[in-house]
Image (tube, helix red, strand yellow):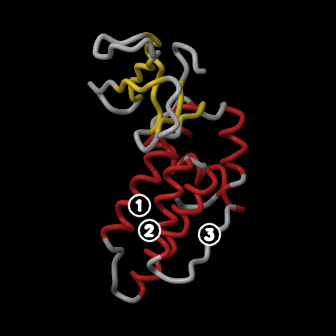
Amino acid sequence: MFEKGDFIVYGTVGVCQVDDISKTDFSDNDKLYYRLIPKFEANRTICIPVDTTKVMMRSIMTRREAQTFIQSWPNVKCKGYRNDKERPLVYKQVFQSGSCTELAAMIKEILQMEQSRKSRGSVLNIREKDGVKTARKLLFGELAAALDIGPDTVPAYIHNVTGCAC
């Protein structure tokens, strides 16, 4: 169970702070609920049962874990896919898992696809654009919270440490 004040990753919302743990006014049961405040979204509150298993929730990485993760960025390998129909299913699984390594692999893969397509005069499709946008929001939001920097500065931070684009 998380504690009041903890920062967690919540589903595809991203980093949230546990604002309160209590019974709610809108439910007749004795269940405890987390009241979550998304760190990078103004004026939004989420109430979710403490014992839910429907949405991934986990603690964010520590500052040291974030620094170690960023140093390992060049070693993150892109996945191989049997066909283009498999890719969206894998992306959905990545978002549900909340795995930082899988999110980084996804970001790297889509960046490579974008560069390859640009050289041929083509662009990413909307699913790929949305996928990389969500992956960046989740991963860069967590890294930003762990490092106490803004999410928009994370790509430059990664580049400064590793020399890699993201």
In the depicted view, which residue is nearer to us: 147 or 44?
44
Q: Residue at x 38, y 33 (%)?
A: 40
Q: Earlier in the sequence, mark 2 or mark 1?
A: 2
Task: Label 3, secondary structure: give it.
Answer: loop
Disc 1 marks a residue whose amino acid type is: Gly
Q: Residue at x 48, y 68 (%)?
A: 111
Measure the alpha-carbon separation of dots 2 and 1.
Answer: 8 Å
Q: According to the image, label 1 marks what residue?
A: 131
In the depicted structure, whether residue 165 falls above or below residue 118: above
Residue 50, image x and y in percent? 50, 23
Measure the alpha-carbon separation of dots 2 and 3.
Answer: 14 Å
In the depicted structure, whether residue 102 falls above or below residue 113: above
Disc 3 marks a residue whose amino acid type is: Cys
Q: According to the image, label 2 marks what residue?
A: 88
Q: According to the image, label 3 marks what residue?
A: 78
Residue 124, image x and y in percent? 36, 74
Give the image quarter of residue 165: bottom right
Task: Label 1, secondary structure: give it.
Answer: helix
The reply to whether callout 2 and callout 1 are in contact (CB within 8 Å) is yes
Pick the quarter of the image with the N terminus: top right
In the depicted view, which residue is nearer to us: 48 or 118?
48
Residue 143, image x and y in percent? 56, 39
Disc 2 marks a residue whose amino acid type is: Pro
Crowding near pointer 3: few (<14 within 10 Å), some, many (20+)?
some
